[in-house]
Amino acid sequence: MSPADKLREAHQLLLKHFGRPDIRDHDPLSVLIKTILSQNTSDLNRDRAYNALMERFGSFENVLNADLSEIEEAIKVGGLARQKAATIKRALQWVMDNYGKLDLSELCDDPDAEKKLTSIKGVGVKTARVTLLFGCKQDRFPIDTHIFRVLKRLGIVPPNATREKAHGIIDELIPPNIADVLHLNLIRLGREICHPRKPDCDNCPLKSICDYALAGGEIRS
């Protein structure tokens, strides 16, 4: 089975196993800030940090005008507060400098949107693509830690590939209009079944097409 066929089959098997996730419309700037806050923490702590940020400041304008120490204090529940506060401040300043207001809507129609977002220090390809996929409905596929692990175990991405190389590989393989559903279902698989240690291969819906499972867990993850 080719990597492209395997990716399509994985999508169908995950749909059958997990169903179609609920995907709601979101403001792109909110998605960007939440994704920055999501780095190296759980969804629960990301949401707690975002809610604390908005409760403290009320608007992104107030966040932009706040001292870094105040932002750090507000988002400390999410971890890495100093690093994330600086990235949030830079991102908001970049949006204001480029669009004259704290609104990322214009970016959604920009063919260079990903390149522009990743020009912000602290905003990587995954963060940019999550923003574009869920905030702008652009057909971009973001690869997080869970997805990266699953793709390597499946044999779709080489074991020694970097995250950046993996994005390029998937861009060539993924069918149109499934990025959002596949992204969320692969994350769920990584969290619930395909764990970093002791993955539950026996109960994995992808075990029939997974190099790692078929080799008895011998493939490097």
Image (spheres, grey):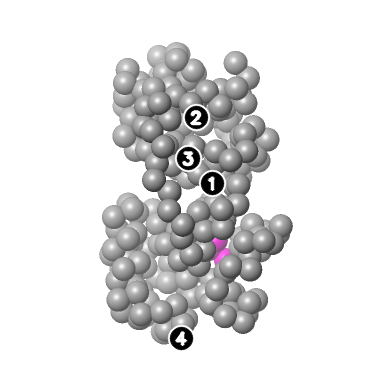
Residue in front for this viewpoint, 168 or 17:
17
Residue at the spot of label 4: 65
Marks 3 and 2, how far apart at CA: 8 Å
Q: Which residues are magenta?
A: 119-123
Q: Earlier in the sequence, mark 4 or mark 3?
A: 4
Residue kind at label 2, given as amino acid type = His
Which of labels 4 and 3 is toward the front?
3
Residue at the spot of label 1: 142
Give the vertical position of 153 relative to 131 (above or below).
Answer: above
- The x, y position of residue 93, in whole percent, is 55, 78
Determine the residue positioned at 61% across, 34% down.
174
Residue kind at label 4, given as amino acid type = Asn
Q: Secondary structure at mark 2?
A: helix
Residue in front for this viewpoint, 125 or 15:
15
Determine the residue positioned at 37% across, 38% down.
188
Q: Residues within 10 Å of mark 4 (few under 14, many from 20)?
A: few
Query: Looking at the image, do the residues carrying marks 2 and 1 touch, with CB atoms under 8 Å apart?
Result: no
